[in-house]
Image: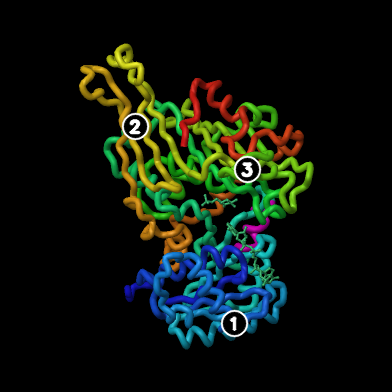
Amino acid sequence: MNEDNPKSILVIFGATGDLANRKLFPSIYRLYKNGKLSEDFAVVGVARRPHTNESFRENVEQSVKASRPDNEEINDRFFSHFYYQPFDVTDLASYQELKNLLESLDEKHHTEENRIFYLAMAPNFFGTIAENLKNEGLTDTKGWSRLVIEKPFGHDYPSAKQLNEQIRQAFDEEQIYRIDHYLGKEMVQNIEVIRFANAIFEPLWNNQYIDNIQITSSETLGVGERGRYYDKSGALRDMVQNHMLQMLALLAMEPPIKLTPDEIRSEKIKVLRALRTMTPDTVDDYFVRGQYGAGLSNGEQVEGYRDETAIDSESNTETFVAGKLLIDNFRWAGVPFYIRTGKRMAAKATEIVVQFKELPMNLYFNKGKDIQPNLLVIHIHPDEGVTLHLNAEKRGVGTTSTPVKLNYYSHNGDKINTPEAYEVLLYDCMHGDSTNFTHWDEVALSWKFVDVISQAWTAKKANFPNYESGSMGPKAANELLENDGFHWWSI
Ligand SMILES: NC(=O)C1=CN([C@@H]2O[C@H](COP(=O)(O)OP(=O)(O)OC[C@H]3O[C@@H](n4cnc5c(N)ncnc54)[C@H](OP(=O)(O)O)[C@@H]3O)[C@@H](O)[C@H]2O)C=CC1
Ligand SMILES: O=C1O[C@H](COP(=O)(O)O)[C@@H](O)[C@H](O)[C@H]1O
């Protein structure tokens, strides 16, 4: 075990919920198993449901086991670090009881009064919890206090601003860790390494050599059990405002002068500031929305979005977005960044394709019909790695060329040791490293960009549904690229 690992109590608000059970408990277990947690730690789960420490520990054990189908032996000592307190976040008396519990656990587990408050709850509670934690003295300790906040951070810029102001009454910006789980993904973090540690890419990373960049995050699943949230959100708020714009910022930012959270953030912010803004009248020239109808998904007949649980039968909510984004700065002027994301699409995959420009004169163009542009493909999920598409001589056919691929897979085919995004982010938070969390300035700029689109879409009803489940989205998403002489590379 690494003795440098910080000692702390992690308080999970919403500990009986889906996120805690599917993602947080398994991630904490992996940190423990891999020696990344000090033995001096405690996890306190709070929610309204009645649980004892014992029944809560059984739940945690089940969720850890469900995430490890290999029947691997579990270290039982892990569960003795877990505690539960029935708690209503709107009831002030609960906070005093929690304060007493934390103080006793500080002593028992030698946690030096360091605390992480993880808000895995509906967003309408975020502000209230932050205020109550401060007012009831739970942040008033000799150690550090950090606040981890799940998405969505607001519904639009004004609501996000209001929420931020409320939270900032209680916590400083440096204490706030806004989660974007894409920033914890191995290959999203690798974007910076690929760009800034390879002499062959950085000199070409600009409008002289790059034709376009495509970012796709497609899902095969539909809206599932999350209809109540999703029908008010849609793909633009659910995926574009956060994950897609964060990936774009990492791809487009200037090299930071140092790899510190502040320097990286400052470069990402410049990209978001340089995004070409649209007016309500020009949104349709740059963005396409879609909603899935019935169709075949993974070989099974599935219903359309409007027939799913908790969805309005005339819903105007988009389950698909494709967009062309332009970054008006010296490096990227004229290079389109295409993004697309959606539910019930043909494949579950997140991938980035960097398409390089053709050579000014390709000597092989007339001889080989099969000359392809060079592509750098960054596979984020389910594969994790990089593929470089080149042209090489066709064996035994003289000077004819053929496309070849150089592949690197970071997990060598077995993903067991690839850390989960939440595991990475929890570990970073325990170490006070906020590099892979979103700063308020990034959140604000992303909302401002997205708000123009959502306002234009709210004002005009769409002709939905407009793509079949199991397809790659509406036809208009293909036309968006075809109008520029490009096409989506298949994923
Ligand atoms: N689930 C996921 O995959 C993802 C979730 N998120 C975000 O994470 C957050 C949590 O999502 P999720 O786990 O799915 O939500 P759930 O609805 O599954 O869980 C909500 C939790 O909040 C608790 N709760 C509700 N009201 C109160 C209250 N008044 N006082 C105390 N506890 C309360 C519930 O427990 P009880 O009923 O016992 O009180 C439950 O533990 C949301 O912000 C969501 O957007 C983000 C990305 C992915
Ligand atoms: O944040 C979200 O992300 C998931 C997709 O995440 P991934 O890691 O599976 O790519 C998406 O399903 C969900 O709607 C959204 O809230």
**Between marks 2 and 3 in the image, the one whose residue lies nearer the viewer:** 2
From the viewer's perspective, tell me whether residue 288 is left or right of residue 83: right
> Residue at the top extreme?
366
Identify the residue position indicated by label 3 in the image: 236
Label 1 CA crowd tier, 10 Å (few <14, some 14–19, many 20+)? some
Q: In the image, is residue 378 above or below residue 158?
A: above
- Would residue 251 be counted in the magenta stretch? no
From the viewer's perspective, tell me whether residue 65 is left or right of residue 99: left
Q: Which of the two labelled residues, at mark 2 and mark 3, occupies the earlier sequence position?
A: 3
What type is the residue that disc 2 sits on?
Answer: His
**Residue 380 seen anywhere in this rendered image of the structure:** yes
Q: What range is drawn magenta here?
A: 159-168
**Between marks 1 and 3 in the image, the one whose residue lies nearer the viewer:** 3
**Residue 245 seen anywhere in this rendered image of the structure:** no
Identify the residue position indicated by label 1 in the image: 99
Q: Quadrant of residue 220?
A: top right
Q: Which of the two labelled residues, at mark 1 and mark 2, occupies the earlier sequence position?
A: 1
Residue 65 image offset from top left, x and y in percent: 48, 70
From the viewer's perspective, tell me whether residue 405 is left or right of residue 43: left
The disc placed on residue 389 is 2
Asked if disc 2 and disc 3 are in contact, CB closer than 8 Å, the reply is: no
The disc placed on residue 489 is none
What type is the residue that disc 1 sits on?
Answer: Lys
What type is the residue that disc 3 sits on?
Answer: Leu
